[in-house]
Amino acid sequence: MVGPLRLLRASAPLRPLIRKSLFHTARPCLAIAPSLPRRAKAAPAVGDYTPAEGEHVLSSPSALARKISARVLPKLPRPDVRKVVVVGSGGLSIGQAGEFDYSGSQAMKALREEGVEAVLINPNIATWQTSHELASQVYFLPITADYVAYVLEKERPDGVLLTFGGQSALNVGIELDRMGVFERLGVQVLGTPIRTLEVSEDRELFVNALKEIDIPVAQSTAVSTVNAALEAAEVIGYPVILRSAFTLGGLGSGFANDADELRDLSAKSLSLSPQVLIERSMKGWKELEYEVVRDGADNTIICCNMENFDPLGTHTGDSIVVAPSQTLPDEEYHMLRTAAIKVIRHLGVVGECNIQYALNPKSREYCVIEVNARLSRSSALASKATGYPLAYTAAKLALGYTLPELPNAVTKSTTACFEPSLDYIVTKIPKWDLAKFSAQVNREIGSSMKSVGEVMAIGRTFEESLQKAIRQVDPRYAGFEAYVGKDLDGPALERALSVPTDMRLFVIAHAMYNKGYTVDMIHDLTAIDKWFLYKIDNIVQTHAALRAAGSLASIDRDLMNRAKRMGFSDIQIAALAGNTTEELARAHRKSLGITPFVKRIDTLAAEYPAYTNYLYTTYNATEHDVEFDEHGTMVLGSGVYRIGSSVEFDWCAVTCARKLRSMGRRMVMINYNPETVSTDFDEADRLYFEELGWERVMDIYELEQASGVIVSVGGQLPQNIALRLKHSGVNVLGTDPEMIDTAEDRHKFSSVLDSIGVDQPQWTEVTSLDAAKNFANKVGYPVLIRPSYVLSGAAMNVVYEESALEYNLSAAASVSPLHPVVITKFIDNAQEIDVDAVASNGQLIVHAVSEHVENAGVHSGDATLVLPPFSLDQTDMARLKEIAQKVAKAFAISGPFNMQIIRKPAGKEGEEPELKVIECNLRASRSFPFVSKVLGHNFIDTATCAIVGAEVPEPVDVMAVKRDYVSIKVAQFSWTRLGGADPFLGVEMASTGEVACFGTDIHEAYWASMQSTTGFKLPQAGSGVLLGGDITKPEMATVAKGLIDLGFKLYCSSPVVEEFLNQLPYVSCKRIFFPTKDKRKLRQVFDEFDVQCVINLAKARGQSVTDEDYVARRNAVDFGLPLVNNARLAQLFVESLAKKIPQGGLRKYTEGRIPSEVQSWKEFVGQHVY
């Protein structure tokens, strides 16, 4: 067990005066608009001393302390700014996710407190920060130098913040500075100077800067060509690590053991970044991070230090991370702490940053890996791990404050220069979704990040926090168990241990549980520190003791207490003690008097009184830190970000929480995702950083004696336990969980639709392959296989022939063995429509209709949505509303719901098109923030009223309003990160995020939206386009003709495509040599013919890695080229080019020429808000 003393920080206080200080409210500010409540303020100041105008004083309620501090604190001039542009990060992608929604939101809270008008540029419509509550103006536009320059020219701000939007914002800021835009427009870069950003990003400048102060860095050489990379590696010696400059999440980075590996890796990396660094490899060393805060007066503190469970070689975003560090002796801790402060001061960072180290486990040799001179993923983790509001504080420092002047907004009892102390352990585990992609995906993890999200668990022992984190990653996991094949053995097992994959933690469990591997054996193969492995061995020993007990009755109080302190769940204990039920294990535990305790995260390790609302549960305690007398409403958050459930559900949860509080209700938030706004310190009356499984939700519900639980704003995770909560006596608010279960079960759902006369595709429930074949032969192929209780189309497949049916059905059935599989007639070439709605007691209150650009067959999460619809007539709209009304009444819905509907064109003239419902979710969907912001009506506010049955508004038809704008939501993919994955759109969701932009018509909106996806580059006029795929698609001919008319050159790899295109009038297409096995040669071919865009309209995924269509798609993303892989989308792309090119759309930023799409949300939507 880890004792509290080991967890306390070992750092010395900044100054004795500051160490003991309290604080008072900050100086008065010039309010430009009603401000948000200043929740982060302490009790009224005592004494009669009031600081003079411009006087800088200590944040303290003591008049004497304020008076003395006015004489000694540095008199830093504060920037005179009244309007500041905040540059966001764009769509969520691997390496740049929800942490920047959290940090940007905190920054804008800080700006608003100071009366500074915030103007936000961010096309990520799913985020909380793009709600108009925080910024005075929001621009849904691409994060590119050109578009940001247009907004700066239009808004004429006093300052700009570049460090709250990840790598995207930082790169744009550096480019704008080089273009001279900031200087010409008189815009001040607040916080960390541009030169510091350049030095931290340019690898060669960074290495030279650290050499100036004798800080060791890895032996390295910056190069910009493949040959130079090979020459540098010869000097340094293999193995080497290649790092890309100006990229996020290690994109393009990797290890090379020889020249061949380096040649391939550097060719790919240099297509993504102008410069790479060849460094000495230090695989096997420890990797550590320090989060550092520095103000303009050179006050510097260490907020948090973190240690990677995995040794160097695994990107920190893909590593298990523990805070604070556990294996460093004090001299090593202070050695790195001192170096961190020295580096940050030398670089001149103002605000927050993080520094990463490699430390030799066999000596005190260390070197700096990199410095992120901005808020990062690690910053969000450190902020949530310590309770220190890093982004909020960094924004205040950017406005000229110093640390002693600022309060700690969480504790309300210390200044911001008080370094946090922890009496608990935090464990972060990444979430990978690699299994969702094609079999070609490489499951190994290394220096380039692949995870799509992360969880954070808090416990008072490493064992407790580790097992909690494992369960948070996936509800199917009960804890530290062997979730790998039991036949894994011998050399295969040794390789699985020595070469990290997304499943290595469970391989370790398998080795220790089933194969008798010792700590030393695991250490020799993994280089994981033995401290961690011995802690895991404690879990293994307790696991054996529980199994040896044989039954629940044989588990006495001591063993039960030991198991719970080690982080074992009730369901885990039930399985080990004779395969009994979770309910019985829970009852037995409670009969022994063993229940969890609620503790505060107070940043002070209980050294000072603190009254935070930031809570966690633990069995390693003897008393609660809080009283349970509020009886609030519980809101279950969305949990870890993953494909299918991302930041859009956090927007829903935060909106619901804020609405509840505005209605005067106390609310309790449960979530464990450190990247979210919902886990920010001031978004809930009580925040539990906890699991969202049945056991923990029941624990908190019983302790809080909550008035009810809301399960419909957090995505699928809360929905999955809704019925069980109801059966356990929980007051589930809103739609009855019995109805939720009916809608989730495909068989029950279809029966209800039949009963109310709502059409649906032909379907049947099958329990055998023969029954499936009979149905498919009866209705005709293709058919869609749909299991019950899925997330993001998991295991859904469209089957075109009987041979594929057998294979796919077995894969689908394995997803939900307790539920039969539904097989449905798939309607080819049909249109798909999304309906988002809110009802109250079965009455429809409000609804939105969005139209997909792509035909049915593309998952709605990957589809391009248009709102208002562009092709539906009034009859269609009326029929869709009627269907929504019928469904709301049939399921007695009180709250949000979403439907996907297929529209099949009429077969004969005079007939109505067929409208068939294919899915209905009785919860908020991923498109709720999109429709709310586009239509100017907050659907979740309305849904919250319906859920609690108070202040329910009258029904309103927002779709009947005529609008002079359109918005398009485009999926953000992360194909570049997922080596080998086939960039093909199907019924299985693959996108990691989304963006949306506005325009006066569909082409203008799409023009901005497609450029908003991270890394998108428009093809230059006269460049080459590689065209391929299914020639039977009618769009193939129109797309080719459109591109030729615009002056592009067409190339193809297939003789079939060549023949087809060259038969078209006025179209010329050249077939080029197309090597499918040699990436370097293919790159040379692309360069030779100046191929800058790939349009591939294949009918199905590639069957092998040498399939020409697969190679074209895969290498488009590997070479950083725009890829269009859907026929209707290609048509819209070409039409948009045709409209925007004559308007100068391909030209770079030009002073005085502001494109028509550069308008704020208020200018587009403002007049329609109600």
Image (tube, rainbow, N blue to C red):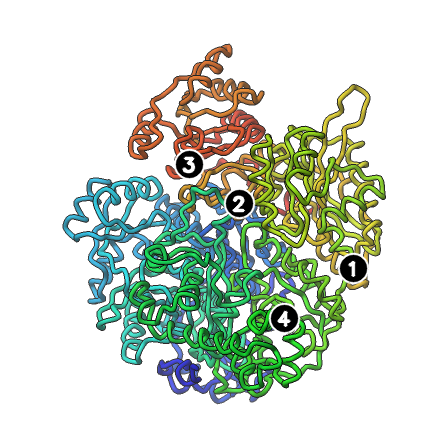
**Crowd class of label 1 (few under 14; some 14 to 19; many from 20; radius 10 Å):** some
Kindly identify which numbered label has been placed on residue 1114.
3
Q: Return the disc, 3 or 1, that comes first in the chain's sequence.
A: 1
Q: Return the disc, 4 or 3, that comes first in the chain's sequence.
A: 4
- Callout 3–callout 1 Cβ contact below 8 Å: no
- Asked if residue 55 shows in the view, the reply is no
Is label 1 or label 2 in front?
1
**Crowd class of label 2 (few under 14; some 14 to 19; many from 20; radius 10 Å):** many
In space, the residues marked 2 and 4 are separated at their CA atoms by: 39 Å
- Callout 2–callout 4 Cβ contact below 8 Å: no
In space, the residues marked 1 and 2 are separated at their CA atoms by: 31 Å
Q: Is residue 774 above or below residue 744?
A: above
Which amino acid, mark 4? Thr
Residue 862 is left or right of residue 741, and the answer is: left
Tell me the element at label 1. loop
Q: Return the disc, 2 or 4, that comes first in the chain's sequence.
A: 4
Q: Return the disc, 4 or 1, that comes first in the chain's sequence.
A: 4
Kindly identify which numbered label has been placed on residue 580.
4
Kindly identify which numbered label has been placed on residue 991.
2
Residue toward you, 592 or 118: 592
Q: Quadrant of residue 199?
A: bottom left
Tell me the element at label 3. helix
Residue 642, percent from left and from top: 54, 54
Tell me the element at label 2. loop
Kindly identify which numbered label has been placed on residue 736.
1
